[in-house]
Image (cartoon, coloured by chain):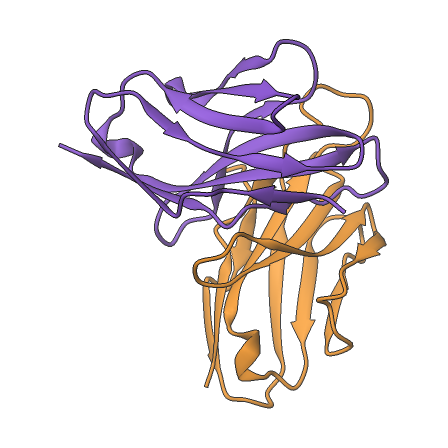
Chain colours: A purple, B orange
Amino acid sequence: AQSVAQPEDQVNVAEGNPLTVKCTYSVSGNPYLFWYVQYPNRGLQFLLKYITGDNLVKGSYGFEAEFNKSQTSFHLKKPSALVSDSALYFCAVRDRPGSARQLTFGSGTQLTVLP
Amino acid sequence: DTGVSQDPRHKITKRGQNVTFRCDPISEHNRLYWYRQTLGQGPEFLTYFQNEAQLEKSRLLSDRFSAERPKGSFSTLEIQRTEQGDSAMYLCASSLAGRREGRFEQFFGPGTRLTVL
């Protein structure tokens, strides 16, 4: 079975500072990993994915994430946070090649960027 | 807007009533997914279609829940005899299939928020 853990319910960071939102995963094979962001009363917006290749992946709005196979982690990062980055962030995983197409999500991390 | 759309956005119903939600995926996407999200949690998978075929169902999908995608385009999710525990946000997502770039990410609609009184 696949699972995702987001160990921090809440992350606060000052505007202009770097931010990190943590994610660890568990799968039986090699993972597909994703980050999504959710604004209030909105659906999830895709930020970035790791499928294969370079461990550092770049996504929308200046976000990036680093895949670390030995630590089974896929932390989301941004060099300089904006107040508008404040939202709920979800990490998700899918087994590869596995027959299951669905994503398994973490419980989410609320990011607050303070002006 | 060419994204995933869902209707209605909000539904309030009384316990025991039936409700039906609709999802219109991105037009070229042949995979369609339903998820349920409760407050403070990440979305949980309910069911998945490839074209009109329902290929997977979660154990969360009790026999009161049924989903269809009759022509491989839009999908409906029906909940019969609603219970207060069904109150949640119901999210629909779609994705490409086959060996095409962009086939891995799922694109989500805005969701239907169900409140069962």
The image shows residue A77, relative to residue B105, as above or below, that is above
Q: Residue furthest front?
A: A70
Residue A79 relative to residue B13: left or right: left
Q: Between B31 and A88, which is closer to the camera in this rendering?
A: A88
Q: Residue furthest top?
A: A54
Q: Residue at x 32, y 16 (%)?
A: A79
Residue B103 placement: quadrant: top right
Residue B5, percent across and down?
54, 49
Residue B49 relative to residue A10: left or right: right
Residue B80 placement: quadrant: bottom right
Q: Residue at x 76, y 60 (%)?
A: B58
Q: Residue at x 76, y 39 (%)?
A: B30
The image shows residue A83, relative to residue A44, as above or below, that is above
Residue B23, percent across and down?
62, 55
Q: Between A6 and B61, which is closer to the camera in this rendering?
A: A6
The image shows residue A72, relative to residue B58, as above or below, that is above
Residue B97, percent across and down?
78, 32
Screen quadrant of the C terminus of chain B: bottom left
Residue A36, percent across and down?
50, 36
Q: Between A53 and B69, which is closer to the camera in this rendering?
A: A53
Q: Residue at x 59, y 87 (%)?
A: B17
Residue B34 placement: quadrant: bottom right
- Look at the image and tell me whether residue A101 can be seen: yes
Q: Residue furthest left?
A: A115
Residue A74 relative to residue B81: left or right: left
- Look at the image and tell me whether residue B106 can be seen: no
